[in-house]
């Protein structure tokens, strides 16, 4: 647990953030103490909530199931993954008809939470609109692609039960109650290391973003039952999620979107073995914590050595029955396309082939790009195209093509939007346009010796 902080203490250790105007001014704003702020500990309340959709911006949740005042937040899969105890009822159906699912190559949801915003903060409400604009400009939207590319607009927020499979109910209900403080003060800081902020809409909009990922899981699973090559899903959502720990927010993240979707896939669809690949430049400590002792969820992270939040050491491989299902590959600063090609061929693919997942979920962070201000790797648009293409093929080989990407980091709007657009092109089996965006003059020699040493060490550690 992090030490408590007050309005004059900030815990951020990321130099890129501490130099920013946001960080310098954060102490002038109200800060709720600690990773799980004490305000949240006071509340354990339940309520009823009307359902809302993104289209109306009055977001609703799926029907909440409260059992005698206790949250029903667990699911039980059988040992062979053949059956599931559906705590929220029958498996959900896709919001799209089968005729559309058969033809689609890409399904995506866009949840840009416009109300969850702080000017000059790197995690702003400009991120998702920049991606959507790039997709339109590069003719990768339904308007230009017809049934090949489908946007699901009328999706529902995650229920509180969905989120409670990953996060503590004290955190969830406390965050909801804290929205009244955000309403009064305009903006509050709910965690100090990011810093992670909240506005009066953060709770409902974060549930909606988590719900977008769930909807895509429903749709991809439904499509996989219709044919051999289901569409890939991409949740263009924010705030990101992979730093959010079970007990609270962290590092710009409010709810663990991909973790919520992983548990949902197990509970609602009987997809027992879930692989999560996280190529964000920062270690997905929240996702790692959520599944550290779980033998049925394989969490694999590539991230920059020594970067925020300082977790993700190579020797952390899981514990108890989950030992061996956490793989951390810290990459030295300056790692780029060569590093990730080697990492995929020698670590990611062999790990997936041995684990044999039922679905692959991807924490797609684009902040490892050489232009991104918050780290020091040198991925390019072409690197992300390679990753998307390779992961797509891996999913086809191992889990009937079931695969959903979740947007995590990426804070240079130009490199973020062009890289996501090239990810879409990889999904469509179309040539990369990276040459239009990548300038080789930006790059410098990668530390190949250190990269090879890291890969050999992790291969030995995991007997790959």
Image: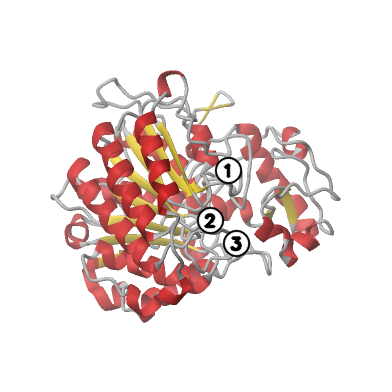
Judged by depth in the image, the label closer to the viewer, 1 or 2, is 1
C-beta proximity under 8 Å, tags 3 and 2: no
Query: Against 428, is 268 above or below?
Result: above
Q: Is residue 276 left or right of residue 357?
A: right
Mark 1 lies on a secondary structure that is loop
Q: Which mark is residue 345?
A: none
Q: Is residue 449 left or right of residue 84?
A: right
**Of all residues shown, which one is farthest toward the front?**
449
The x and y percentages for residue 297 are 38, 32
Which is nearer the eye, 47 or 220? 220
- Between discs 3 and 2, the one toward the N terminus: 2
Q: Residues within 10 Å of mark 2 (few under 14, many from 20)?
A: many
The x and y percentages for residue 235 are 41, 56
Q: Disc 1 and disc 2: Cα gap in Å?
A: 21 Å
Q: Disc 1 and disc 3: Cα gap in Å?
A: 14 Å
The x and y percentages for residue 455 are 38, 42
Which is nearer the eye, 328 or 172? 328
Which is nearer the eye, 403 or 198? 403
Query: Against 464, is 385 above or below?
Result: below
Whether residue 151 is visible here, answered yes or no, is no
Mark 2 lies on a secondary structure that is loop
Q: Which mark is residue 123?
A: 3
Q: Which mark is residue 59?
A: 2
Query: Against 50, is 21 above or below?
Result: below
Q: Disc 3 and disc 2: Cα gap in Å?
A: 21 Å
Q: Which mark is residue 244?
A: 1
Q: Quadrant of residue 79?
A: top left
Residue at point 53% right, 33% down? 289
- Between discs 1 and 3, the one toward the N terminus: 3
Residue at point 45% right, 47% down? 450
């Amino acid at each position: 647990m992090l030490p408590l902080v007050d309005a004059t203490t900030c815990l951020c250790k990321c130099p890129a953030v501490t130099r920013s105007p946001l960080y310098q001014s954060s102490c002038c704003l109200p800060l709720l103490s600690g990773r799980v702020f004490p305000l949240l500990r006071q509340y354990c309340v339940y309520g009823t909530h009307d359902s809302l959709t993104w289209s109306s911006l009055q977001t609703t949740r799926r029907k909440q199931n409260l059992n005698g005042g206790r949250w029903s937040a667990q699911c039980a899969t059988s040992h062979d993954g053949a059956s599931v105890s559906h705590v929220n009822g029958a498996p959900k159906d896709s919001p799209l008809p089968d005729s559309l699912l058969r033809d689609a190559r890409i399904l995506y949801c866009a949840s840009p939470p416009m109300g969850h915003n702080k000017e000059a903060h790197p995690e702003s409400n400009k991120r998702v609109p920049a991606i959507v604009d790039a997709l339109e400009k590069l003719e990768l939207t339904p308007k230009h692609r017809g049934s090949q590319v489908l946007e699901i607009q009328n999706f529902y927020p995650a229920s509180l039960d969905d989120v409670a499979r990953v996060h503590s109910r004290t955190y969830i209900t406390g965050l909801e109650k804290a929205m009244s403080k955000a309403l009064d003060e305009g903006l509050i800081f709910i965690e100090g290391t990011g810093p992670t902020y909240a506005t009066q809409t953060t709770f409902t909009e974060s549930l909606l973003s988590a719900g977008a990922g769930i909807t895509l899981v429903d749709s991809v699973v439904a499509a996989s039952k219709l044919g051999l090559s289901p569409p890939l899903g991409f949740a263009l959502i924010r705030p990101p999620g992979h730093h959010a720990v079970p007990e609270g927010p962290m590092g710009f993240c409010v709810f663990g979107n991909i973790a919520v979707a992983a548990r949902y896939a197990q509970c609602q669809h009987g997809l027992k073995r879930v692989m999560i690949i996280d190529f964000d430049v920062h270690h997905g400590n929240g996702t790692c914590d959520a599944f550290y002792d779980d033998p049925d969820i394989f969490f694999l992270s590539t991230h920059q050595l020594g970067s925020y939040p300082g977790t993700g050491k190579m020797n952390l491989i899981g514990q108890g029955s989950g030992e061996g299902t956490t793989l951390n590959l810290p990459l030295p600063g300056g790692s780029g396309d060569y590093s990730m090609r080697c990492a995929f061929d020698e670590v990611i693919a062999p790990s997936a082939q041995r684990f044999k997942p039922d679905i692959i979920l991807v924490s797609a962070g684009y902040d490892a790009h050489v232009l991104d201000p918050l780290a020091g790797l040198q991925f390019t648009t072409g690197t992300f195209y390679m990753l998307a293409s390779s992961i797509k093929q891996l999913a086809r080989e191992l889990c009937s093509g079931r695969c959903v990407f979740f947007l995590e980091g990426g804070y240079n709007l130009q490199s973020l939007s062009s890289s996501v657009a090239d990810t879409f092109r990889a999904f469509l089996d179309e040539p990369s346009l990276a040459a239009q965006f990548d300038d080789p003059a930006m790059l410098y020699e990668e530390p190949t010796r250190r990269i090879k040493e890291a890969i050999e060490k992790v291969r030995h550690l995991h007997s790959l």
